Amino acid sequence: MQKTSSINSSAVLADAAILSQEELKPGFFRLVLSAPELARRCQPGQFVQVRVSDGVAPLLPRPISIHGFDGEQGTLSLLYHVAGQGTGKLSRLAVGESLKIWGPLGNGWIMPENLTGGSKNLVSDSEVSDSQNFVGGSEKIPTDAPVDADKILPLFVAGGIGVAPLPPLAKAWRDLGAEAILLYGARSADQIVTADEFTAMGVDVRIATEDGSEGVTGRVTELLKDLNTGDKLPLLYVCGPKPMLKAVAQLADDQGWLCQVSLEERMCCGLGACLSCVCKTKTGDEKVGGKGWTHAKVCTDGPVFWSREVVWNG
Amino acid sequence: MGNLNLQVNLGGLAMKNPVTTASGTFGFGLEFAPFIDLNRLGAIVVKGTTLEPREGNPTPRMAETPAGMLNAIGLQNPGVEAFIRDYLPPLRQIDTPVIVNLSGNSVEDYGRLASILDGADGVAALEVNISCPNVKQGGIQFGTLPASAAAVTRAVRENTQKPVIVKLSPNVTDITEMARAVVDAGADALALINTLLGMDIDIRTRRPVLANIFGGLSGPAVKPVALRMIYQVYKAVNVPILGMGGIMNGQDAIAFMLAGATAIAVGTANFTNPRATLDILDGIEEYCDREGVRDVNELIGAAH
């Protein structure tokens, strides 16, 4: 049966007032919204649908990942890059105006508490978890051995604006006292934003730019190649353009590391209804005459998936 | 507003109000449960269902266009057996009739689907999608030829006791010809319009935007076409019409009823506002209250 449990039962619709709108670097904006009920329900790695206009231009909402949330303050922050009509219009909205948003949507990153305790949240291949509380793109952790959070090296891997959904995750690992690393790649220094937030959380930030204007010259994969992981098992949390996700996933797979990727697709509803935003994921049934893949919904089965679930060449 | 009668009858299907959902925009209904009380809807039309599971088309499957959107999902669905087993039981808990949209590759497929769904508890009516490719006729769509549209309708009619609503394609020269053909073949009601065939091209990549090249256009951009076709079909046949095509608010819904729709379906608007169906229902009630309308049935076809 398909995953009917992946419905976003905690999502709410909100008229969110704009508290601040800041251009961090040319074309890169951070928007802070007041949305108390929504902010209380967020998990790292989830996203919201943002309706930029009341009219027909643009018509559809924009899925934007949650950059930060504060349940006590009732605020939500979104980090976005102006890419087209919708984000352009969003960037021109000012403090005091409000936006229709709904969420939190989707399954976010696997959190340290879901790794600890061995068997509780680790599900073998023959079982399917129906826990509504399980946060993570997949119901299965792709390793046979129990995994303890203190044996994990959390590695955040960002490509450009892909850094957006990572701070709440970094915060969760910091709260555990974990030593974490951010590998952050972009075309040039003027596309590196919010790196200081990670530094402030004690994350070891390493930067690569394609033009060499900051950090190592090259792509983010350069930073991965010489990584000293000590006696810990890296758990990669990756968000960025698809070619980057694929390259990092391949590297992680070759090394036997755990790797989660946050996928992006064109989306209409964000609720699992329209089936616009599918991606191919493995089913393992090719050995029994099946085709070996299925179309999973990025919005409700993801956006976070284990990299080994994804069919990268589909 | 307490005296307002909102009940309508769509070809034998009694509805507590005229607001339904357009197939493919509302999933299997429960996806919208966090935002609206599903019990308030007049009916729920669920995702298109086929005999076998289908994975649908490659991505990109959608593109935004001026005041509209294109989609080429390709009928991704778990198949009729999985629908009955996994999705129908929770839908039965809702006090709203469920209309199942069905699609086939052959006339026989439609007959079999109708027969299977006829025996399914919790299915109130069938909406027949005749706009998908006809494999046996080498790619010609059922919905663009009166004879094949009639054949599909007959196959469904002969295999079910439930109301049969045939959803017409607008991609035809004369919509009234199609309407007459399927009514003569036993349709209890008509749904129109399905999406308009369209495409978009990315001038940067110099390639069509959709992987499938062509897709169905929906949203406010198609509303004038939909209204015109409903107006024409209302005059041409004597069965109720489920009207849809770019309905975004209560005023749009009223216009569709005035053109001849007995009930209306909300499609693309569900993506722009997950509460769209109930906002539209509220808008209909407000209009009736303001205009002194006691019974929504007074509105049906009143523009003629």
Image (cartoon, rainbow, N blue to C red):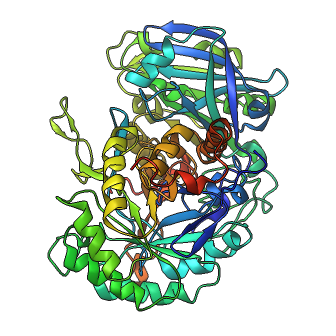
Residue A279 x %, y %: 43, 54
Q: Residue at x 64, y 36 (%)?
A: A102
Is A112 positioned to the left or the right of B45 in the image? Answer: right
How many marks can you see?
0
B256 and A155: which is toward the camera: B256
Q: Is residue B47 visible?
A: yes
Question: Picture coordinates of residue B265 (x, y %)?
Answer: 50, 54
Query: Of residues B107 and A142, which is closer to you in this image?
Result: B107
Is there any visible trace of residue B63 in the rendered image? no
Q: Quadrant of residue A313?
A: bottom left
Q: Is residue B286 left or right of residue A79?
A: right
Q: Residue at x 30, y 64 (%)?
A: B236
Instruction: Name the quarter where the C terminus of chain A is drawn.
Output: bottom left
Quarter occupied by the N terminus of chain A: bottom right
Is B124 situated above or below B212?
below
Say whether residue B165 is left or right of residue B184.
right
Instruction: Give the left or right position of residue B163, taking residue A120 as reference.
Output: left
- Figure check: B274 above or below A208: below
Task: Determine the residue positioned at 17% across, 71% down.
Answer: B139
Task: Please tell me in which quadrant of the rendered image residue A219 appears.
Answer: top left
Q: Is residue B302 above or below residue B164?
A: above
**Relative to A172, is B75 above or below?**
below
**For residue A138, what is the image quadrant?**
bottom right
Image position, residue B20 (x, y; %): 56, 57
Residue B42 in the image, given as x and y percentages of width and height = 63, 60
**Closer to us: A153 or A135:** A135
Between residue A173 and residue A37, name the one nearer to us: A37
